[in-house]
Amino acid sequence: VLLSVGVLALCICTVALQSPSGTSWMTLSFLASSDGEAAEYSRLHSLAEVLGVFTFILVMGPMVLNGALKFLIEKFDRVALSVDVHMERIRFSLCSRSFTIHGLQVDNPSGGNWKSEWLLKADSVEVTFQLGLLIKSLGAKCELERLCVNNLIINYELESITSNNIQPIVDFLEGVKLDQSSRKIRTKKLVEY
């Protein structure tokens, strides 16, 4: 739909650059009888070009941004969470300070004998955040105003009495590592509760 609107906006700007006789304003600027008329046609042409490009960016920008966000999340999911994250699509809105992820799936941690392939599934996750604080802290702090999750399914699996499929993710976020005798040691604190 957005692609259609963007193409339509470019078509409207192209039509706007046509004179009633069918020649373009650019052509008319060279055929004009005086320098004043040529300058006027040139200004109209430049204005129509700027409006066309602005409309195209306004319509296509969110589509490109949403695709880039989806790519980055799915590319760096293991770096941030130590598990793969999949989604159908993401919609980011700067005006409403929110993003919505549709078809979210978080896979189980590798290395376990899990019955299910995934840890978490949700039809949609909508997050509204405090934009001012995010900008002011240069991305170091983010305060959520609203979190709405639809049709959330969590597969909590116990591999043994002391091992489950959520703990490896929590350990990764808290910077917990195993030493040579398989004891947990905390190396750094990444997440504050």
Image (cartoon, rainbow, N blue to C red):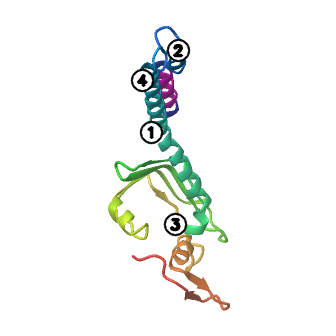
Q: Which residue is mark 1?
A: 58
Q: Quadrant of residue 41?
A: top left
Tag 4: amino acid: Glu
Q: 188 or 7: which is nearer to us?
A: 7
Q: Which residue is mark 4?
A: 40
Point out the tag, 1 or 4, that comes first from the N-terminus.
4
Q: In the structure shown, which secondary structural element does the residue marked by tag 1 occupy?
A: helix
Q: Note whether 19 is above or below 12 in the view shown.
A: above
Q: Which residue is mark 2?
A: 31
Tag 1: amino acid: Leu
Mark 4 packing: few (<14 Cα in 10 Å), some, or many (20+)?
some
Tag 3: amino acid: Tyr
Q: Which dot, 4 or 3, sits closer to the camera?
A: 4
Q: Which residue is mark 3?
A: 156
Mark 3 packing: few (<14 Cα in 10 Å), some, or many (20+)?
some
Q: Note whether 173 is above or below 101 in the view shown.
A: below
Q: Which residues are magenta?
A: 4-14
Give the distance between the C-alpha atoms of the residues marked 1 and 4, in whole angstroms.
27 Å
